[in-house]
Amino acid sequence: MTDRLNGPQDPRDDESRGASPAPAPEAKGARLGPSPLIAWFFVLPAMLLLGVWVVYPIVYSLIRSLFDASGGIFVGLQNFGTIFTDQATLVTLRNNLIWVVVAPLVVTVLGLIFAVLTERIKWATAFKLIVFMPMAVSLLAAGVVFRLVYEQDPDRGMANAVISTMAGVFSGESGYPDARPRDNDASPVVRQGETVVTRQEVQAGTPVLVPLVGIKPENVPKDAAPARAAPGDGALSGTVWLDFTAGGGGKAGEVDATEKGLPGVTVEAVKGGAVAGTATTASDGTFRFEGLPAGSYVVRLPQSNFEAAFGGLTWLGPTLITPAIIGAFVWVWAGFAMVLIAAGLAGIPRDALEAARIDGATEWQVFRKITVPLLSPVLLVVFVTMIINTLKVFDLVFIIAPSSVQPDSNVVALEMWRVSFGGGNNQGLGSALAIFLLILVLPFMIMNIRRFRREQS
């Protein structure tokens, strides 16, 4: 109280009482931290690299896009107009649209499914390692791998090998596409369109002979038994066999001891143009119709017997080439999406999930109304990143698509390289495509930058 009445005190009195002196005010214009010159010294190399590798190419490409192929004639925006008028370039834009719509969505959904599943299995680490492993493979190597996977021949292409195996399991039938009757008047059967029929009508009690040739011995089924003549026991019966004796010999039109029957052949008894009965040959090639009314019939082998066995899909054809390449892209990037989403799942408060379960919510409701909304920032990051990657895709399309179908699978990045350096020699149009691709990517990059700033603020 005395101090307040007596006015300001001498600072030395505070020092004598042990109080620390008040900090001196900062000098006007004083700056904390290192000198700006030192900061510029460290930033300058990065800025030089950005200028050389990013800014200069963008500016040069923008200027080059305003000139013709030779670079000597100013054409203004003509190259950009070509992008939207040339038929080949329009196909490229269509393919890029398919990529942007399909690939990021599939990658994000699969990453979400894998991330959720890894929380419920004991071998989660091994599963994550297997799914993430393709990220260690370059896109060039992945393209080579999938070029082999999509081979048309099932003996070489894994995709068609799996499909052909499954088709064989469910159909259980094998055709004889090369089978045909002998081209002479002595043969008891003749080709009629895509079918094989007997020359004359036949009746029960007389065995029907259906000799076929044109089948390579190695293509005869392994379960084929030596052919034998069907017994004439009052029913309409006969034999379908390979009328060929290895090493020569034998008699045409007759069942010889060393000749093989053709199992699994569908045989029809036709009367008045209608099928009256159907039978299937046994391992020795014999067949028998049961319960046929008495009368004369034409024995026919329908077209289904001469269709080639299913050999898989034409993955590298014009129709399926883009979905096939997108499949390879998903294989590479699904692990990346899974890891990011799994990290987001680890940060979700478990009490919110448990509270929902206690309130009676099903697992699907918990996933749809709690897990997914809480993961939406991470899902958006994955989705936008995949959009940027799909816009820049080049390696997979270039490696997987054969040259004959590359126009059907083309994308902007590959078209940019093709018209500039891959034989087109039109760097004006190539530069226009590069600027167009940059314009497509920029909105998504800006979106990511703004989101990062919001998270840091």
Image: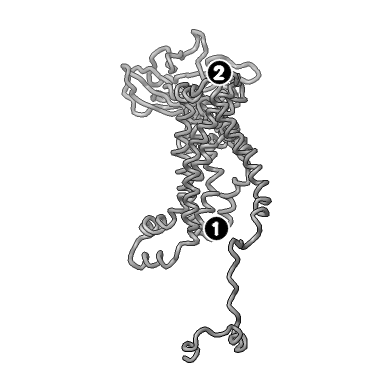
In which quarter of the view is residue 69 placed?
Answer: top right
Name the colour scheme.
one colour
Q: Residue at x 48, y 56 (%)?
A: 455
Whole-number angstrom distance, CA of label 2 to CA of label 1: 55 Å
Residue that sits furthest to the bottom in the current view: 2
Q: Is residue 435 left or right of residue 360?
A: right
Percent x, y of residue 335? 55, 49
- Front in this rendered view, residue 402 or 102: 102
Percent x, y of residue 275? 34, 22
Q: What element carries label 1?
A: helix
- Front in this rendered view, residue 64 or 264: 64
Percent x, y of residue 269? 37, 22
Residue 39 vertical position relative to residue 62 in the rendered view, above or below: below
Q: Residue at x 49, y 30 (%)?
A: 310
Q: In this view, does 248 lie to the left or right of 449?
A: right
Determine whether label 2 and label 1 are within 8 Å by CB.
Answer: no
Mark 2 or 1, closer to the camera: 1
- Front in this rendered view, residue 280 or 318: 318
Q: Which residue is drawn at 59% across and 28% down?
A: 417
Amino acid bearing label 2? Gly
Q: Name the residue under label 2.
A: 214
Residue 340 vertical position relative to residue 142 in the rendered view, above or below: below
Which of the two discs, 2 and 1, labels the residue nearer the N terminus? 1
Q: Mark 1 points at which residue?
A: 124
Q: Is mark 2 on a helix, strand or loop?
A: loop
